[in-house]
């Protein structure tokens, strides 16, 4: 494996936070009434 365990763990955590952030943004956009009109 080229990546060390530490680096791999950091990437996984960052990936998780980015996914959660994007998910929150999508939910906010979905809840905006102006978007569907």
Image: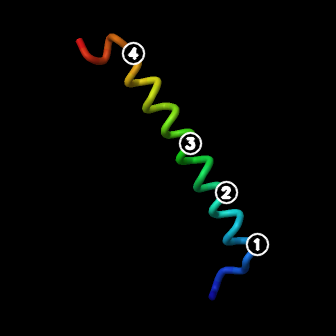
Residue for badge 2 = 13
Instruction: State how far apart marks 2 and 3 are (Cα).
Output: 11 Å
Instruction: State how far apart marks 1 and 4 are (Cα).
Output: 40 Å
Image-based side of 12 in relation to 19, left or right: right
Instruction: State how far apart marks 4 and 2 are (Cα).
Output: 29 Å
Image-based side of 24 in relation to 30, left or right: right
Q: Secondary structure at mark 3?
A: helix
Instruction: State how far apart marks 1 and 2 are (Cα).
Output: 11 Å
Quadrant where the image shows the N terminus: bottom right
Neighbourhood count class around disc 4 (C-alpha, 10 Å): few under 14, some 14–19, many 20 upward? few
Q: Secondary structure at mark 4?
A: loop
Neighbourhood count class around disc 2 (C-alpha, 10 Å): few under 14, some 14–19, many 20 upward? few
Q: Secondary structure at mark 1?
A: helix
In x, y percent, where is residue 19? 53, 47
- Residue visible at 26% across and 17% down? 36
Instruction: State how far apart marks 3 and 1 are (Cα).
Output: 21 Å
Mark before the other along the chain sequence, 4 or 2:
2
Mark before the other along the chain sequence, 1 or 2:
1
Residue for badge 1 = 6
Residue for badge 4 = 32
């Amino acid at each position: 494996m080229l990546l060390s365990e530490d680096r791999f763990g950091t990437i996984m955590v960052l990936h998780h936070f980015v996914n959660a952030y994007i998910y929150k943004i999508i939910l906010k956009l979905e809840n905006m009434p102006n978007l569907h009109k």
